[in-house]
Amino acid sequence: MSELEGQTVVIVGGSSGMGLGAAQVAAKAGASVIIASHSQEKMDAAISKIDGIKGIQVDILNEQSIQQLFEQVGQLNHLFVTAAPGSRGEFLKQSINDARKYMDGKFWGSYTCAYYAAAKISQGSITFLSGGLSRRPEIGSSMVTASQAATEGLAKALAVELAPIRVNTIIPGAIDTEMWDFLSEEEREKFRQQAAEVPARRIGQAEDIGKAAVFLMTNSFITGTVIEVNGGQFLI
């Protein structure tokens, strides 16, 4: 693969999980990959796994930090934002501050990254990561659902406003990453089995999201689109 040869890809949240999966696929496609994360420790671990990638610390909740990130990066071709600090909680039990933190991280973090990256993108793309709760809300997901839906709406609006920069969104299904490490091994295996009940008959891997992200980076006729990478989850 060499579709991204000579191009610079920035992945915010690229030190672990789906972001790391995207970094691995983009690097294999020939890109110069820069991952950005709040955790230097996670970035160091990621850099040790992938030859040639670079890491820059960023606080997705801090505008100045994001601005400095893209000043340091300079010109780029593609931006993929996966970071989402904060946690879900039931509407009447979660504090307003905790709810706002998730919106600040997911929606405003994506917004701010796009804001400071757009002027530095040459013939490229911006991709956001959403989630299935924007389609099927659950109890305790009110702010997560709202943030994901808002991010998808932002991508469509920016696809029009920032053209010819292309802007898209990926909705992942159940992906087997370290985000589930809080489960016991028995619980994790049960989760994998349940997740594999989708039509694809398997749980998703970080690489699946990475391949979708690189597809959106390399197909110059796709913009304003939401791609579901979930093994057919919404069909059942």
Image: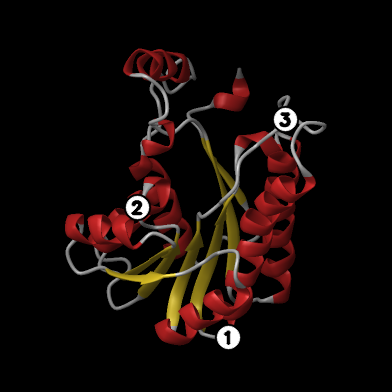
- Secondary structure under tag 1 reads loop
Q: Nearer the viewer, residue 177 or 226?
A: 177
Residue 18, horizontal then vertical, whole percent: 41, 47
The quarter of the picture where residue 10 lies is bottom left
C-alpha distance separating marks 2 and 3: 27 Å
Of residues 23 and 190, the one nearer the viewer is 190
Local crowd size for mark 3, using a 10 Å CA cut-off: few (<14), some (14–19), many (≥20): some
Residue highlighted by disc 2: 20
- Given this view, does label 2 or label 1 mark the residue nearer the observer? 2
Residue 22 is tagged as: none
For residue 100, side relative to residue 37 (left or right): right
| CA gap, disc 3 and disc 1 | 35 Å
Residue 79 versus residue 144 in the image, above or below:
below
Residue type indicated by callout 3: Pro
Disc nearest the viewer among 3 and 1: 3
Q: Quadrant of the C terminus?
A: top right
Q: Are marks 2 and 3 in contact (CB under 8 Å)?
A: no
Label 2 element class:
helix
- The residue tagged 3 is 137
Q: Residue furthest right?
A: 92
The answer to whether residue 149 is seen in the rendering is no
Q: Residues within 10 Å of mark 1 (few under 14, many from 20)?
A: some
- Amino acid type, label 1: Ala
Q: What residue is at 47 percent from the left and 78 percent from the top?
A: 69
Q: Which residue is mark 1?
A: 119
Q: Residue at x 62, y 57 (%)?
A: 105
The one nearer the camera, 180 or 172, is: 180
Q: Could you tell me residue 211's position as x and y percent?
A: 37, 49
| Position of the N terminus by quadrant | bottom left
Cα separation, mark 2 vs mark 1, equals: 25 Å
> Which secondary structure, mark 3?
loop
